[in-house]
Image (spheres, rainbow, N blue to C red):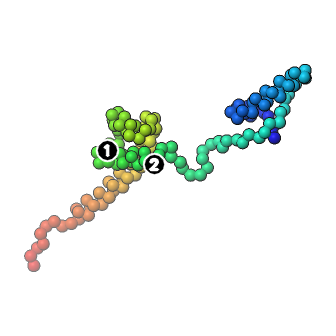
């Protein structure tokens, strides 16, 4: 059993313990007692964890949705300009079942976290390849 404080009221309302408290208060008033302060013993109500999850990073989107979105952003038609049009957004929302705000936030975050690093790697790799081709002597071998 614990002690009731004002901060417990929202939790007690949700858990159904308020009916027990109301009954105790009614019986005190019926006895003609004046109560300046009221302390009632109630069963301990477990507190819900507050704050972010303690174990690792969690995604609010299903894995299949994330794979769909990653495939869209890296598709050759979109890789140079990873900003879906309004029609493409509507199509993606229909295909994945996510809301517009989730979609917008996903694209904002993943252009920075997923798309940009991969595009930079691709451009660096293509520069290395073009440099190696530039160093090849294309003139025919000289006769000896």
In x, y percent, where is residue 144? Answer: 10, 79
Question: In the rendered image of this protein, does residue 49 appear above or below residue 7?
Answer: below
Q: Residues within 10 Å of mark 1 (few under 14, many from 20)?
A: few
In x, y percent, where is residue 41? Answer: 83, 36
The image quarter in which residue 87 lies: top left
The residue wearing badge 1 is 78
Question: In the rendered image of this protein, does residue 27 appear above or below residue 126?
Answer: above
Position of residue 138 in the picture relative to residue 91 (left or right): left
Question: In the rendered image of this protein, does residue 28 appear above or below residue 108?
Answer: above
Circle number at residue 45: none
Residue drawn at 74 percent across, 40 percent down: 45
* CB atoms of marks 1 and 2 within 8 Å: no
Position of residue 50 in the picture relative to residue 38 (left or right): left
Q: SS of the residue at dot 1?
A: loop
In x, y percent, where is residue 136? Answer: 21, 66
The quadrant the N terminus occupies is top right
Can residue 41 be seen in the rendering of this structure?
A: yes
Can residue 7 be seen in the rendering of this structure?
A: no
Q: Residues within 10 Å of mark 2 (few under 14, many from 20)?
A: few
Residue drawn at 54 percent across, 50 percent down: 57
In x, y percent, where is residue 116? Answer: 39, 49
Q: Observer-nearest residue: 137 or 129?
A: 129
Q: Observer-nearest residue: 135 or 34?
A: 34
Residue drawn at 26 percent across, 64 percent down: 132
- First in sequence: mark 1 or mark 2? 2
Residue drawn at 27 percent across, 61 percent down: 129
The residue wearing badge 2 is 63
């Amino acid at each position: 059993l614990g002690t009731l404080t004002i901060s417990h009221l929202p939790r007690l309302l949700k858990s159904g313990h308020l009916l027990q408290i109301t009954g105790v208060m009614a019986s005190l008033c019926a006895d003609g007692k004046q109560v300046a302060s009221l302390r009632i013993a109630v069963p301990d109500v477990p507190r819900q964890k507050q704050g972010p999850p303690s174990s690792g990073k969690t995604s609010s989107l299903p894995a299949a949705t994330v794979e769909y979105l990653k495939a869209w952003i890296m598709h050759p038609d979109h890789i140079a300009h990873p900003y879906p049009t309004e029609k493409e957004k509507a199509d993606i929302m229909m295909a994945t079942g996510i809301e517009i705000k989730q979609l917008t936030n996903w694209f904002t975050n993943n252009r920075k976290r997923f798309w940009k690093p991969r595009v930079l790697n691709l451009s660096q790799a293509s520069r290395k390849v073009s440099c190696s081709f530039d160093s090849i002597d294309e003139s025919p071998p000289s006769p000896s």
